[in-house]
Amino acid sequence: MLLADTLRKAHQLFPRKEAIVCGGRRWTYEEFHGRLSRFSRYLKNAGIEKGDRVAILHPNCHCFLEVYYAIALRGAAAVPLNYRLSAGELLLIMNDAGARVLIADPRFRETVDRMRADLPAVEKIVWTGDTKGKPPDGDRDISYEDIVAGMPPAQIPEIDIEEEEIAQIYYTSGTTGRPKGVMLTHKNVMVHALGTIAELHLTDRDVWLHAAPLFHLADAWATWAITWVGGTHVLVSEFDPQAVLTTMEKEKVTLTNLIPTMLNMLVNYSGVKGFNYSHLRVLLSGGAPIAPEVVRRIVETFQCDYIQTYGMTETSPYLTLSLLKEHLLQRSPEEQLHFKSKTGREFIAVELRVVTDKGREIKRDEKEVGEIIVRGDTVTPGYWQLPEETSRAIKNGWLYTGDMAVMDEEGYVTIVDRRKDMIVTGGENVYSTEVENTLYLHPAVLECAVVGVPDEKWGEAVQGIVVLKPTRKATEEELITFCKERIARYKAPKSIDFISSLPKTGSGKIEKKKLRDRYWPAAEKKIH
């Protein structure tokens, strides 16, 4: 099956049902289908063919959902961009992908203008929303709404697409700092959508809130699953506790997936108890570790079910859910909360094992630690134009996640460490190597290391540890500013400690574990 099949099903069964609510505007499935069909036809007229790449630089909006589908209907691959990245980082990604079209929100006009001269493959820049003050770039710049209004209604042209063809490329930082494009096929995304429908019991009665960013798979997967069952998509442009809680009540939201930072902000919001959550049936968290105490407060505050999720961009994304088995529902509330706070049991669409370095499955005693490996129809075929990276990650059909975990006798896993030096801050992945490489560019830095440290707001914060050259000086503020000028602000260290020397192994490698242990002794759950 193809992504277009989910839309055809919804259009056939629910044409007059409310499909999208965004910024006070509403569209039925028939209207949704009509708008994206016309844009898909424009892409055809613009010469976009099967296998081409189309980039999206946009906050949450009905346009994002429309173009996700319009691109898929052409057999092209969507390249969602993290708008928090710098112009230089975005430029690297777009040129690596070879995107022929960029769809952008006007708020990113300054960023696009800084890039446009260095985007030789981009033939069209399509601006959504208000087009006043459109950059004068001849035929290259065009209005999205002009396209939708001017294109005549027509049937979506059939195109020969195989389920193994690429539907999306999501870029994630590599361990060397170079972005890696994770390829997801129509089959990957469809099987995952079907799995979530089964696991979460999604139906046309559901109202999904898109509050986490649509450029991230923590939320983007719901585009296909919610549409497939004829549910309603409700969007907020950016996360704001007041806006989210107001929308939950007004639109009678039934479920959503938020990163732990967002959930923590909601339960700590001063007016959280002043809203009606009676329609909310489940809250999911994903994208970062979450403290058990936050889980407790979520359940107490919203009086609904809670499910912790774990996944990867490479797996579409879900690998586990902390759904309780039937017999566990007979346990005490405290015991149930204990299981809900675990990483979870394997997702229905994957096969998951936790193995030692020698390949033996670990004991289910919650003591022995192993690496999570997975296989299944939701697992990426590999990284865009990076065959060596692909072969390192996927061995004999198994994807090696790099996440270290223990497992209990019920088959629920709990992640205890990461093999890679990745920091998860506010739901965003930050690789320490990239930040270290930036710090090393400063003339005063002799040696440095970057680790994740506990942070009540963000889950983890980026911590720099620096050894200065004997004859040079630099302040904490200076080095942080230096990083912010060269990489995305969220990747820059939140703080920097200066020390005389870094601990090293016998072979001369920096021992990051010793550095991390200085910051984590009181933490209940060590991620690193």
Image (spheres, rainbow, N blue to C red):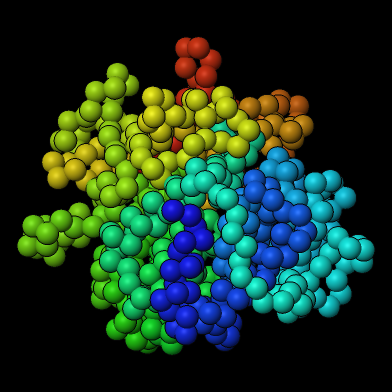
Position in image of residue 95 (x %, y %): 74, 43
| Residue 332 figure quarter | bottom left
- Image location (x, y in percent) of residue 119: 81, 48
Please tell me which residue is depicted at 53% across the width and 15% down the height of the picture. Answer: 508
Q: Is residue 289 above or below residue 223?
A: above
Left or right of 511, for residue 520: left
**Relative to residue 282, is residue 492 depicted above or below?**
above
In the image, residue 521 lies at what x, y percent?
Answer: 35, 41
Residue found at x 38% / y 43%: 377
Q: Nearer the viewer, residue 174 or 171?
A: 171
User: How many numbered markers are drawn?
Assistant: 0
Residue appearing at x 79%, y 51% in the figure = 122
The C terminus sits in image quarter:
top left
Instruction: Using the image as rendered, state which of residue 388 and residue 472 is in the foreground.
Output: 388
Q: Residue at x 72, y 54 (%)?
A: 48
For this rendering, which residue is in front, 390 or 303? Answer: 390
Q: Is residue 466 visible?
A: no
Asked whether the viewer can see residue 378, the reply is: yes
Residue 329 is left or right of residue 303, and the answer is left
Quadrant in the rendering for residue 336: bottom left
In x, y percent, where is residue 300?
A: 26, 73
510 over 456 or under it: above or below: above
Q: Nearer the viewer, residue 423 or 231?
A: 231
In the rendered structure, the answer to whether residue 307 lies left or right of residue 443 reads left
